[in-house]
C-alpha cells in the first residue's frame, strides 16, 4: 500500500499529464534522422489542403466577428472537436505513449487525471462565458468592472501565457521535424512560424477551427488504427496485452503498479492545481466558446471535447503497451547501444512503422507535425485578439475603433507574434518544454482564472480587488518560478533555490484569491457600490442569455 500523500500526489500530478510529461518527452538532445520522403509528401499535401481552407475562410471574413469568432456559426459538435484538437497535441500523442512505454500503468493515471479540468469549464464557465462575452474572456471579466484596468490586466496575462505556451510548441515542433523529416531545427521553427502566420492572417478563427477539426479527425483515425492493430496482435484480449508486456519489459511486474513518478508531493499538487484550473484560464481555449451560436452549443462543445479527449487518452495507453510488445522487442528500432532510435518519445512513431509500414509512418509523422501547427495558430490568434480587441479597440480607442482598424491591428500583431515565436523557439532550443508548459498553466491559473471566476460568481468583487489581486497572482507566479530550482539553480547557476518547489500555483493562486477578496471587501468607493449593483443584471444575462448576441432559449 502506498502512503496516502504519495497516492494523492500521484493523482494530483495526473491532472497535468499530457502537457508536461508529453512535452518532457521531446526534450534533450535529438539526432537528425535521414529524410523520410513519405512523411514529407504527406505533410506537404496536408499543408496545401489547409492553405486551401485558409483561402476559403478568408473569403468569408467580412467583419471582426467573422475574424475572431467565425461569425458564431460553429456548431457544438464542431467546436468540441476543435477544442479536443487543441489538446490532442503531438506532444501528448508521443509523450503519453512514451510514458506508458517506459513506466507502464503510471501513464494511465496521468492521462485520465488530465480530464479533471473539464467539468470545471463545463459547470462553472462555458455557458456564462458565452452569454456575457463577445470575442475574448476580458469582455466577461470587465463586464461590470473598469474596462481599462481589467482589460489591461487580462491582455497582459493572456500575452504572457501565449508566449510561454508558444515556446513549448515551437521547440516541440523543431525537435519533431529534426527527428521525423531530417530537416534542421532552425529551418523547422521558421517553417512553423511562417505557416501559422498565414493561417491566422488570412483565415482567422474560421480557418483555425477547421484546421483543428481536420487534424483531430486524422489524429484520432491514426491512433484508432494503431490501437486496433495492437489489439489484433493479442487477439483483442487485454490480459494477454498486459501479461506479454510484463514478460518483455525491463521493469517486469513493476509497470503494473502506480506511483513511481512523483518525487515531491507539494510540487505535484502545485502543478496539478495549475493544470486543472489553468485549463479554465487559457485564452485560446476560452476564445473557442464565442464561436458557437449560444450557451446550449457551448455546453455541448465541452461534452464532445471531453468525450474525444477521453477516448484519445485510452488509445495512447493501448499504443504505449503495444510499443512495449512490438517495438522494444524489435532490434530494427534500436541503435547499437540498445536504446530506441530517436529516444523514447519516438515509441509511437516506431509502432506506426511496425503495424502499418513506411506509408503509415509518413502519415503519423505528418499528422504529428500538423497538430503543432494548428495549436500555434490558435495561440497566435488569441494573442493577436488580446492586443487588438482588448488593448487597441477597448483601452486605447475606448471602444470607438471600427472593425477594419481592429482587424488591421490584429494582423500586425500576428506578424509580430510570428517573428517573436520563431526567435523564442530558436533561443529556448535547449530549454525543458515541460517547464514552459507548466509556467503557462501556472500563470493562467493564478491571473486569468481567479479574475474570470469571481467576476461571474462573486457579487462583492470590485475593480480595485480584481486589479490588485490579479497582478499579485501574475507577479507571484512568475516571481516564484524564477526563484524556484529550475531557473534559479539550473539557468542562473546559484547553488540553492530560494523557493524550493518546481511550480508556484499552490501559493500564487492563494495569493491571487486572497488579494482579490481583501482589496474588494475593503473597497468603500462610489465606483465599488455601482459595480456591486451591476452584479444582478449581469447574473440575469449570464443565466438567460438575454442581450447576448445570437442567444436563444435553453
Image (cartoon, rainbow, N blue to C red):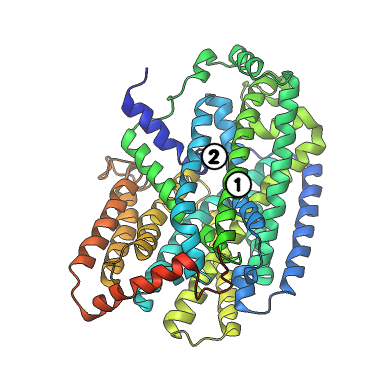
Find out whether the residues at labels 2 and 1 contact each other: C-beta distance under 8 Å. yes
In the image, 367 versus 464, the foreground residue is 464
Write the residue at 54% across / 65% down: 382
Residue extending farthest to the top is 247
| The C terminus - image quarter | bottom right
Residue 385 horizontal side relative to residue 349, left or right: left
Residue 179 in the image, given as x and y percentages of width and height = 66, 40
Q: Residue at x 32, y 28 (%)?
A: 5
Name which residue lies at 59% across and 60% down.
297
Q: Position of residue 24 (x, y in %)?
A: 51, 39
Per the image, the residue denoted by label 1 is 89
- Crowd tier of the residue under label 1, counting other residues whose Cα lies within 10 Å: few below 14, some 14–19, many 20 or above: many
Above or below, 404 against 335 in this view is below
Instruction: Tell me which corner region of the image, top left, top right, bottom left or bottom right, holds residue 537.
Output: bottom left
Give residue 440's mark.
none
Q: Is residue 466 left or right of residue 191?
A: left
For label 2, the residue is 22
Q: In this picture, is 457 found above or below 352? A: below
Q: Nearer the viewer, residue 511 or 124?
A: 124
Amino acid at each position: 500500500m502506498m502512503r496516502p500523500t504519495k497516492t494523492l500526489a500521484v493523482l494530483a500530478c495526473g491532472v497535468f499529464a499530457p502537457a508536461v510529461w508529453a512535452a518532457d518527452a521531446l526534450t534533450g538532445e535529438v539526432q537528425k534522422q535521414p529524410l523520410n520522403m513519405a512523411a514529407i509528401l504527406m505533410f506537404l499535401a496536408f499543408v496545401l489542403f489547409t492553405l486551401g481552407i485558409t483561402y476559403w475562410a478568408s473569403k468569408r471574413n467580412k467583419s471582426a466577428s467573422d475574424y475572431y469568432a467565425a461569425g458564431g456559426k460553429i456548431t457544438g459538435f464542431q467546436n468540441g472537436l476543435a477544442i479536443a484538437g487543441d489538446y490532442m497535441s503531438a506532444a501528448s500523442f508521443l509523450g503519453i505513449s512514451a510514458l506508458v512505454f517506459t513506466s507502464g500503468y503510471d501513464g494511465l493515471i496521468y492521462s485520465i487525471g488530465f480530464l479533471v479540468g473539464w467539468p470545471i469549464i463545463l459547470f462553472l464557465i462555458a455557458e456564462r462565458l458565452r452569454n456575457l462575452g463577445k470575442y475574448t474572456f476580458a469582455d466577461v471579466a470587465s463586464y461590470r468592472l473598469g474596462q481599462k484596468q481589467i482589460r489591461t490586466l487580462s491582455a497582459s496575462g493572456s500575452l504572457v501565457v501565449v508566449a510561454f505556451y508558444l515556446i513549448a510548441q515551437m521547440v516541440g515542433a523543431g525537435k519533431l521535424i529534426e527527428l521525423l523529416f531530417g530537416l534542421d531545427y532552425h529551418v523547422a521553427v521558421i517553417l512553423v512560424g511562417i505557416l501559422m502566420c498565414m493561417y491566422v492572417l488570412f483565415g482567422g478563427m474560421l480557418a483555425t477551427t477547421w484546421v483543428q477539426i481536420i487534424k483531430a479527425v486524422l489524429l484520432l483515425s491514426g491512433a484508432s488504427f494503431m490501437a486496433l492493430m495492437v489489439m489484433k496482435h493479442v487477439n483483442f484480449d487485454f490480459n494477454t496485452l498486459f501479461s506479454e508486456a510484463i514478460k518483455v519489459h525491463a521493469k517486469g511486474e513493476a509497470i503494473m503498479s502506480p506511483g513511481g513518478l512523483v518525487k515531491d508531493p507539494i510540487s505535484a499538487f502545485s502543478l496539478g492545481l495549475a493544470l486543472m484550473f489553468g485549463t479554465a484560464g487559457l485564452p485560446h481555449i476560452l476564445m473557442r466558446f464565442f464561436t458557437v451560436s449560444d450557451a446550449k452549443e457551448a455546453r455541448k462543445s465541452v461534452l464532445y471535447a471531453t468525450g474525444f479527449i477521453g477516448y484519445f487518452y485510452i488509445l495512447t495507453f493501448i499504443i504505449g503497451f503495444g510499443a512495449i510488445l512490438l517495438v522494444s522487442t524489435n532490434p530494427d528500432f534500436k541503435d547499437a547501444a540498445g536504446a530506441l532510435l530517436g529516444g523514447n518519445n519516438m515509441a509511437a512513431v516506431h509502432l506506426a512503422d511496425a503495424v502499418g509500414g513506411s506509408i503509415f509512418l509518413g502519415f503519423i509523422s505528418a499528422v504529428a507535425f500538423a497538430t503543432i501547427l494548428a495549436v500555434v495558430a490558435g495561440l497566435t490568434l488569441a494573442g493577436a485578439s488580446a492586443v487588438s480587441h482588448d488593448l487597441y479597440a477597448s483601452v486605447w480607442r475606448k471602444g470607438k475603433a471600427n472593425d477594419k482598424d481592429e482587424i488591421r491591428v490584429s494582423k500586425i500583431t500576428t506578424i509580430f507574434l510570428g517573428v517573436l515565436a520563431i526567435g523564442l523557439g530558436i533561443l529556448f532550443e535547449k530549454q525543458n518544454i515541460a517547464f514552459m508548459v507548466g509556467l503557462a498553466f501556472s500563470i493562467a491559473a493564478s491571473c486569468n482564472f481567479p479574475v474570470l471566476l469571481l467576476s461571474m460568481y462573486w457579487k462583492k468583487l470590485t475593480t480595485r480587488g480584481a486589479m490588485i489581486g490579479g497582478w499579485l497572482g501574475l507577479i507571484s507566479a512568475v516571481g516564484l518560478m524564477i526563484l524556484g530550482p529550475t531557473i534559479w539553480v539550473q539557468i542562473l547557476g546559484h547553488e540553492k533555490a530560494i523557493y524550493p518547489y518546481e511550480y508556484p500555483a499552490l501559493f500564487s493562486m492563494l495569493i491571487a484569491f486572497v488579494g482579490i477578496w481583501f482589496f474588494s471587501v475593503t473597497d468603500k468607493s462610489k465606483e465599488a457600490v455601482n459595480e456591486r449593483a451591476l452584479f444582478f443584471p449581469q447574473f440575469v444575462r449570464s443565466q438567460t442569455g438575454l442581450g447576448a448576441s445570437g442567444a436563444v432559449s435553453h
